[in-house]
Image (cartoon, rainbow, N blue to C red):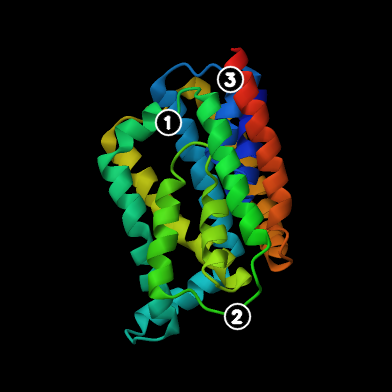
């Protein structure tokens, strides 16, 4: 992978992991536009792991105070608000873990330049964002039933072109939850999944570090980390101001362009 390609793809990952426009879809579109050639499946997996680790790290930094409070609540061994929140996150992870364990090969087959599929899924994301942007403001906390439904939407968002943050935040808002609390839940619920996926990939032995690929990896990590910090902070502010529907127009436009481009190939 070229250094410039690694920088661009890292920036795409960092921005779109938090902005509700689908990181997986934009990475695939970015590779198609750039004509990026990755030497092997192992190198592709290694780069993916590195940039996802970067965005997970940026999430931890942005929500460091929340994470510390959750850990304190858990270590107190009491059924307090923090412990309940942590268990709701664990509950929301179950659908995605199930899909990841039993349908991983099928999901990976969908990430092979399927531009038309990405286009249609971006339009689905746009519809969710449009509806959520017009939902009523409330102060409701994320409930146990909400956690399950949000978890299902996160599992569906494993498809290329469906925004994970867009699907989970929109679902939470449409369930009547407070927007800020919906964004907090959405961003925190993905951190254990990212680290779990990274651990699984490392333990599988499919990742092979090659000396010639170290510079693009470092650049991709740095780009994803810095843009991830900016995008995560920006997204929280946008959710508070109920600006999600603006991203729906973007998803509609990019989705239609992707579908047309795919049909013309």
Secondary structure under badge 2? loop
Name which residue lies at 38% across and 71% down: 145
Residue farthest top in this picture: 265
- Mark 1 closeness class: few <14, some 14–19, many ≥20 residues within 10 Å: some
- Whole-angstrom CA distance, mark 3 to mark 1, is 24 Å
| Residue in front for this viewpoint, 250 or 87 | 250
Q: Mark 1 = which residue?
A: 45
- Mark 3 closeness class: few <14, some 14–19, many ≥20 residues within 10 Å: some
- Whole-angstrom CA distance, mark 2 to mark 1, is 41 Å
Nearer the observer: mark 3 or 1; the answer is 3
- Whole-angstrom CA distance, mark 2 to mark 3, is 43 Å
Image disc number at residue 139: 2
Where residue 35 appears, as percent x and y from the top left, is 61, 16
Secondary structure under badge 1? helix
Tag 3 or tag 2, which sits nearer the N-term? Answer: 2
- Residue 133 lies in quadrant: bottom right
Tag 1 or tag 2, which sits nearer the N-term? Answer: 1
Task: Answer with left or right where residue 17 lies relative to residue 83.
Answer: right
The quarter of the picture where the N terminus appears is top right
| Residue in front for this viewpoint, 116 or 98 | 116
Where residue 9 appears, as percent x and y from the top left, is 61, 32
The quarter of the picture where the C terminus appears is top right
Image disc number at residue 262: 3
């Amino acid at each position: 992978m070229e250094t410039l390609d690694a920088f661009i793809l890292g920036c795409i990952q960092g921005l779109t992991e938090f902005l509700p426009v689908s990181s997986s879809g934009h990475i695939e579109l970015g590779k198609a536009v750039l004509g990026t050639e990755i030497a092997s499946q192992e190198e592709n997996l290694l780069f993916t792991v590195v940039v996802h680790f970067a965005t997970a790290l940026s999430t931890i930094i942005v929500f460091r105070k929340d994470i510390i409070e959750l850990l304190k609540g858990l270590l107190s061994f009491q059924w307090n608000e923090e412990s309940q929140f942590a268990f709701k996150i664990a509950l929301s992870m179950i659908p995605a873990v199930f899909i990841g364990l039993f349908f991983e090969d099928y999901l990976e087959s969908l990430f092979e330049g399927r531009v038309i599929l990405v286009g249609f899924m971006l339009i689905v994301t746009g519809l969710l964002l449009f509806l959520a942007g017009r939902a009523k403001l409330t102060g409701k906390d994320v409930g146990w039933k909400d956690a399950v439904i949000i978890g299902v939407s996160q599992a569906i968002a494993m498809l290329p072109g469906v925004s994970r943050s867009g699907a989970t935040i929109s679902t939470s808002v449409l369930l009547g939850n407070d927007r800020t609390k919906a964004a907090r839940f959405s961003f925190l619920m993905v951190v254990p999944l990212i680290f779990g996926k990274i651990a699984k990939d490392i333990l599988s032995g499919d990742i092979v570090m090659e000396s010639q690929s170290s510079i693009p990896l470092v650049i991709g990590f740095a780009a994803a980390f810095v843009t991830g910090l900016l995008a995560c902070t920006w997204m929280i502010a946008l959710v508070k101001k109920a600006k999600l529907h603006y991203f729906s127009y973007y998803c509609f436009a990019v989705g239609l362009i992707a579908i047309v481009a795919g049909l013309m190939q």
